[in-house]
Amino acid sequence: VVVLGAGYVSAPLVEYLHRDRNVRILVCSHLKDEADNLANRYPGVESIFLNVQERPDTLKEVISSADVAVSLLPYALHHVIAKECIESRTHLVTASYLNEDIQALHE
């Protein structure tokens, strides 16, 4: 599972996912310290620096290697993540509402 974002909402998700030792978790954030701090709380959780707007190549690599991507990024970035998930055939979960950019990707 790729967790995009390492803010306050991410910690409970990572804790929950970490309960299942069969789930591999990668925390990605443009704030490397936040990603590292979150990952270091749970053995086996990995973290990387990722600015999704500046590194689409890394975003593609990370998403295509996952079964599920959870975007806890600001809603304005969800369409970027959703497009990559569609191309990679990776499941996407967000905690955000449906905006016009995401609606346009429906078909």
Image (spheres, helix red, strand yellow):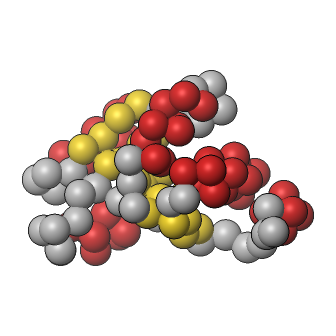
Say which quarter of the image contains residue 55: top right
> Can you give x and y, in whole percent of width and height, for residue 99 in the image?
83, 66
**Which residue is painted at 28% across and 55% down in the image?**
25
Going by the image, does 37 lie left or right of 61?
left
Closest to the observer, 88 or 57: 88
Q: Identify the image quadrant of the N terminus.
A: bottom left
Q: Is residue 102 visible?
A: yes
Say which quarter of the image contains residue 78: bottom right
**Which residue is painted at 11% across and 53% down in the image?**
43
Q: Is residue 68 above or below residue 2?
A: below
Q: Identify the image quadrant of the C terminus.
A: bottom right
**Which residue is painted at 54% across and 28% down in the image?**
57
Q: Is residue 73 visible?
A: no
Closest to the observer, 32 or 69: 69
Question: How many numbered marks does the figure carry?
Answer: 0
> Can you give x and y, in whole percent of width and height, for residue 59 in the image?
52, 37
Going by the image, does 18 lie left or right of 64?
left
Say which quarter of the image contains residue 33: top left
